[in-house]
Amino acid sequence: MLGSVARLPVVGVVAHDDALRSRIAAALQAGELEVGELTRTVENFTGAGIDVVAFGCSASDHDIRNLRRARDRCPGAPIVCLVVEPRWKTVRALLRDGAEGVVALEELEATLPAAVRAAHVGQLTLPSILRREIAQPTLSVREKQILAMVVMGFSNLEISTKLFVAESTVKSHLSSAFAKLGVRSRNEATALILDPASGLGTGILEISGEARRDSDRVSSTTAV
């Protein structure tokens, strides 16, 4: 007996722009997928009967908050985000906040149906242009030193004093490191580095000189 054919997912569409919403729906229908609920805002989205959500966003802080709301409103449905520029920093933020797939708007018609099908069966999809950037970020020695001290809880002023550099230099290195890690704050950087699921871990850091002695003192104090 032949196995039953898997049911195609019903896709809900959330996009503030009317033209984009229509374009998403047309691409899904052309890909032989059923379009369910179409709304402009997350507030109007019920998520009833939806298997996958196609979410048009700009990856602004406002849209990322809306992404979280969409995930909470429809917790069983994976979310595929459509973005204008699929840069790794943007994509990483979207993945961290609930997206299971990312599609570039310029490739919408060609890639959205496939991304939706993949998300429905538990597969993550990203634009191939990100292949090189998905690898573990390459940090300079100084960026590793400063991030290590951030993880240890030192302030920028304390770091500048211990490394004998200007506080503005510390801020510059942190800004560069944050961009490479795809985070926006010290707390996010620390959480990402210490998160065992991220694959980063403290092995990406480097502590030397005065910073290493401080680290040893902290470890000794903790041990006591």
Image (spheres, rainbow, N blue to C red):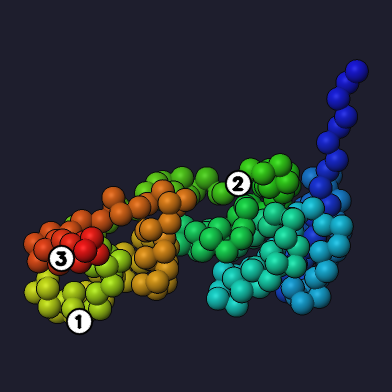
Which disc, if any, is residue 157?
1
Point out the residue furthest to the right here: 1
Left-right relation of 199 to 48? left
Q: Earlier in the sequence, mark 1 or mark 3?
A: 1
Q: CA distance from mark 2 to mark 3?
A: 43 Å
Q: Earlier in the sequence, mark 2 or mark 3?
A: 2
Within the image, what quadrant is residue 191 found in?
A: bottom left
Q: Which residue is mark 3?
A: 217
Q: Amino acid at mark 1?
A: Leu
Disc on res. 124: 2
User: Label 1 to label 2, Cα distance in Å?
Assistant: 41 Å
Q: Is residue 6 above or below residue 159?
A: above
Residue found 38% across the figure and 66% down from its top: 189
Residue 86 seen by the camera: yes
Disc 2 is placed on an element classified as loop
Badge 1 or badge 2: first in the primary sequence: 2
Mark 1 and mark 3: Cα distance apart in space: 19 Å
Mark on residue 17? none
State the image coordinates of residue 111 (x, y, percent, origin top left): 67, 47
Residue 223 left/right relative to 98: left
